[in-house]
């Protein structure tokens, strides 16, 4: 069997393995969320201001919240297997509609963040390593240190103050100018314009991380024996850097990036709140306070599917980058 | 010499300030003629590798550089030429092979593309031509199925095959000089013999001048035309191989050569009737686990130790010899139960220690102790020497005072000052650390010492000292020893009996002298035939 065939088999098998993993995550999330005091009925009743215990009982029976936990879980699992994520009583909409409405926004933010963080991180790390101990290296290292140490929400607020309020270069919040009713390319431009500040805010921390990693990884690879061999062959420094060292140095960065996609979803809650970005992070935040467990579970399910999928993609990229990794 | 390829005159290589010495190499004068093999011999730190790097302009500048002298290569001074010209010379006119063939090749590029780079950078050829040449080269170095190997990655080849690929790469453009920096040190003895033959065949074909750096006098005897001996950055003696090996003039050369263990086995000692250790039908396999959720086939299983039976008598030294991967170290670890064997018995004083659990094993640990190969990795760098040695007796129930007295006594036995007690491992040299390792093993008054390649990380003169120390201790304490080694010269000097291992099995056992005189198994004969420098006996 050749290598690409092997990789296909591997992907198929990993997808199969992903199903029990995701179901296990669903079960764990279910119990964890039920550990929290109160339920959706408490919140609804509290907001209404007056509700009799009888009425609350009736609502619980209607939502199925009067059943014992294992029964609730079984019902939920049965629905999930049939790809039905349930109904959000708070929003009075099916969960999957709510989620898919917001998913696009989050995916857009995450993708642009990963591209910026990994891309620029690799580039800056490479530049720093190539210009080791010069002012460029020092500048990049100081930049990485500062961004690494700065809290996300503060960066977000400062961005808004500097670039939106003082200078009015970028919009303060939201994903598009809904009052303008842009169509086609104009709409893309508008969304891109709104995307700039949240992406920069979210990517700065990771950018710093990857820059530092890439720099260290490049320096480590420069010390390897095969670099001496390459020099002894008479290759130019440029070829040694870009063909020999770069590919080897990328490996740890790719691994790290894959691991952090999950953390990125967590980070996006803050950024989405600061910039009022209509994504899953905001939705999760709201539904947590409303005890809207169905919606919350749905969001968690989607996140876990995302993490499993991204890990698979990273593993495949890793296989392609490093022939020593055996797939079987 | 008028037809000399390379003439190094009065070269100094300076080290950064604050180093142990100012100059790594001082006043070096060497020349090399076409078709000649010059061996540079020396112990670690003698400056031989830096000399090789200096020729290629590969010193780690700006800290280490040639501060004085000329390197005349066919009329050009390599210390003066531009970086651009140096790059032209590297790989096409002077090329180099290295000690560690695994790390010297880029792990993520195919062998073919690594050879291809040389052609791309030095000559203009079409891609198809380059590929054809690469396959031809791999064929020339006798690699099997070159058309497939050209697309392989380094990790898919064995150590010997990788070194062949390195040689193919180095000889791609028929360089005038080949620099070989310990190219066979990391290889097994049979592979080493093949690689040495390949280098000399290639040399004869292309009239290449070979600068061969080594620490092994056996190799020198086999391949050198002339020899330069280096010590602390100075060439102390040069001359033809015959003169240097058989009539060394400089005291350092004399000392080095006398430290090389002879291939003539020592006369056998009387064998005791008392058996101290019996290993019966021990097996150990690795791998075989299956993946998560039992999807897929189980991974491959390796028989590291297969049905091994050995017997050790009191006061005897049993050598376990074999090449890498033969299972010698695994056997040693099973014997002292650092690893549990899968089946079989290990009988110590009539008790099968395989059946004992952790707590029951503890008193038995004192009876059987191990000396490890790497004196740098086997001592905890954060623990003082006194503590390292004292720990064992204290765990076994000795009081602080007893343990301390014992430690000081042991330091004296292994030839270290008692001030060593309060120092950390990094303050000692490799040989001294190995002495500490031995003292640590002896602290528990063991009956049996298992020594896993105790001298293979050491220079030859230090090696001789450690071997004589082990010898002394063995007689003094009537120790029985399992001595694991890949070096048949060492085995000849240390062991009373030998067990030859291959692929986890013992193919032959017998008294050392008998095995050297009339090996029964074909593999033993191959091993003995591959020992370098057989025709030379000092």
Image (cartoon, rainbow, N blue to C red):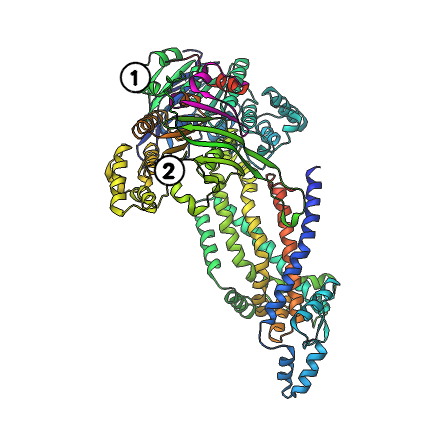
Q: Which residue is found at the position 62% from the left and 44% from the top?
A: B290
Counting other residues with Cα less than 10 Å from the Cα at mark 1, is it few (<14), some (14-19), or many (20 or more)? few
For disc 1, the marked residue is: B250
- The quarter holding residue A102 reads bottom right
Outermost right residue:
A82
Q: At numbered mark 1, what does the secondary structure look like: helix, strand or loop? A: loop
Q: Nearer the viewer, residue A91 or B217?
A: B217
Position of residue B261 relative to residue B115, above or below, is: above
The chain letter under disc 1 is B
Q: Nearer the viewer, residue A232 or B487?
A: B487
Provide residue B479's location: percent of width, then percent of height.
Answer: 35, 30
The chain letter under disc 2 is B
Provide the residue span drawn in magenta: B493-521
B121 displayed left or right of A19: left
User: What separation in Å lies between label 1 and label 2 (alpha carbons)?
Assistant: 45 Å
Q: Nearer the viewer, residue B298 or B535?
A: B298
Residue B496 forms part of the magenta stretch: yes
Q: Which residue is found at the position 37% from the left and 37% from the top?
A: B367
Provide residue B46's location: percent of width, then percent of height.
Answer: 35, 27
Contact? badges 1 and 2 (CB < 8 Å)? no
Q: At numbered mark 2, what does the secondary structure look like: helix, strand or loop? A: loop
What mark, if any, has residue B367 been given in the picture? Answer: 2
B270 displayed left or right of B355: left
Provide residue A317's location: percent of width, then percent of height.
Answer: 63, 46
Provide residue B27's location: percent of width, then percent of height.
Answer: 32, 23
Position of residue A132 relative to residue B263, above or below, is: below
What mark, if any, has residue B24 been given in the picture? Answer: none
How many circles with numbers are drawn on the protein?
2
The first of marks 1 and 2 along the sequence is 1
State the quadrant of the C terminus of chain B: top left
Residue B21 forms part of the magenta stretch: no
């Amino acid at each position: 069997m050749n290598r690409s065939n092997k990789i296909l088999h591997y992907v198929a098998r990993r997808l199969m393995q992903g199903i029990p993993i995701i179901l296990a995550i669903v079960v764990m999330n279910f119990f964890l969320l039920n550990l929290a005091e109160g339920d959706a009925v408490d919140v609804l009743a509290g907001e209404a201001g007056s509700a009799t215990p009888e009425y609350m009982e009736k609502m619980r029976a209607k939502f199925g919240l009067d059943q014992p936990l294992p029964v609730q879980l079984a019902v939920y699992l049965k629905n999930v297997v049939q790809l039905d994520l349930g109904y959000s009583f708070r929003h009075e909409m099916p969960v999957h509609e709510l989620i898919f409405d917001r998913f696009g926004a989050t995916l857009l933010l995450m993708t642009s963040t990963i591209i910026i963080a990994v891309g620029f991180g690799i580039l800056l790390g490479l530049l720093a390593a190539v210009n080791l101990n010069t002012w460029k290296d020092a500048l990049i290292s100081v930049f990485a240190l500062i961004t690494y140490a700065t809290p996300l929400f503060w960066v977000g607020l400062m961005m808004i103050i500097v670039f939106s309020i003082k200078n009015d270069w970028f919009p303060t919040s939201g994903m598009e100018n809904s009052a303008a009713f842009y169509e086609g390319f104009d709409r893309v431009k508008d969304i891109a314009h709104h995307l700039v500040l949240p992406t920069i805010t979210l990517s700065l921390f990771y950018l710093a991380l990857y820059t530092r990693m890439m720099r260290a990884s490049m320096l480590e690879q420069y010390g390897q024996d095969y670099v001496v061999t390459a020099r002894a062959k008479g290759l130019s420094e440029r070829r040694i850097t870009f063909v020999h060292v770069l590919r080897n140095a990328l490996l740890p960065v790719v691994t790290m990036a894959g691991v952090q996609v999950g953390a990125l979803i967590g980070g996006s809650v803050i950024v989405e709140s600061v910039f009022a970005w209509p994504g899953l992070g905001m939705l999760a935040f709201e539904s947590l306070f409303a005890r809207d467990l169905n919606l919350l579970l749905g969001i968690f399910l989607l996140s876990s599917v995302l993490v499993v999928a991204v890990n698979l993609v990273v593993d495949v990229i890793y296989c392609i980058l490093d022939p020593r990794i055996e797939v079987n | 010499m008028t037809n000399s390829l390379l003439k190094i005159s009065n070269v100094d290589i300076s080290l950064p300030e604050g180093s142990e010495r100012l100059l790594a190499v001082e006043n070096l004068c060497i020349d090399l003629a076409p078709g000649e093999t010059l061996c540079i011999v020396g112990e670690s730190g003698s400056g031989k590798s830096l000399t090789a790097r200096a020729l290629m302009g590969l010193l780690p500048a700006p800290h280490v550089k040639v501060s004085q002298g000329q390197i005349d290569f066919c009329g050009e001074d390599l210390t003066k030429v531009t970086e651009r010209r140096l790059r032209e010379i590297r790989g096409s006119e002077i090329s180099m092979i290295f000690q560690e063939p695994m790390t010297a090749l880029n792990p993520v590029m195919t062998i073919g593309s690594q050879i291809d780079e040389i052609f791309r950078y030095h000559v203009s050829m079409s891609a198809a031509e380059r590929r054809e040449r690469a396959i031809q080269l791999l064929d020339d170095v006798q690699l099997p199925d070159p058309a497939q190997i050209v697309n392989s990655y380094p990790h898919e080849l064995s150590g010997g095959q990788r070194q062949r690929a390195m040689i193919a790469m180095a000889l791609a453009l028929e360089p005038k000089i080949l620099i070989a920096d310990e190219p066979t040190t990391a290889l097994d003895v049979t592979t080493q013999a093949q690689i040495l033959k390949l280098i000399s065949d290639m040399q004869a074909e292309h009239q290449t001048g070979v600068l061969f750096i080594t620490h092994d006098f056996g190799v020198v005897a086999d391949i050198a035309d002339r020899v330069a001996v280096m010590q602390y950055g100075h060439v102390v003696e040069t001359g033809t191989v015959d003169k240097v090996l058989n009539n060394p003039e400089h005291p350092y050369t004399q000392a080095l050569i006398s430290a090389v263990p002879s291939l003539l086995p020592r006369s056998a000692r009387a064998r005791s009737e008392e058996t101290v250790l019996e290993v019966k039908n021990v097996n150990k396999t690795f791998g075989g686990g299956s993946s998560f959720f039992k999807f897929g086939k189980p991974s491959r299983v390796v028989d590291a130790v297969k049905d091994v039976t050995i017997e050790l008598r009191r006061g005897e030294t049993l050598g376990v010899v074999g090449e890498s991967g033969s299972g010698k170290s695994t056997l040693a670890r099973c014997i002292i139960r650092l690893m549990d064997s899968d089946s079989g018995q290990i009988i110590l004083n009539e008790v099968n220690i395989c059946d004992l659990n952790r707590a029951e094993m503890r008193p038995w640990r004192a009876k059987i102790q191990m000396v490890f190969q790497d004196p740098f990795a086997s001592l905890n760098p954060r623990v003082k020497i006194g503590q390292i040695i004292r720990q064992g007796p204290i765990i076994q129930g000795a009081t602080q005072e007893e343990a301390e007295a014992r430690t000081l006594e042991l330091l004296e036995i292994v030839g270290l000052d008692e001030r060593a007690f309060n120092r950390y491992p990094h303050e000692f040299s490799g040989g001294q650390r190995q002495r500490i390792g031995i003292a640590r093993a002896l602290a528990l008054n063991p009956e049996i010492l298992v020594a896993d390649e105790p001298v293979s990380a050491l220079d030859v003169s230090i090696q001789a000292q450690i071997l004589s120390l082990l010898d002394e201790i063995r007689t003094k304490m009537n120790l029985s020893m399992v001595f694991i080694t890949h070096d048949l010269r060492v085995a000849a000097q240390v062991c009373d009996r030998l067990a030859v291992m291959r692929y986890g099995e013992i193919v032959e056992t017998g008294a050392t002298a008998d095995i050297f005189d009339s090996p029964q198994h074909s593999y033993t004969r191959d091993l003995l035939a591959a020992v370098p420098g057989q025709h030379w006996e000092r």
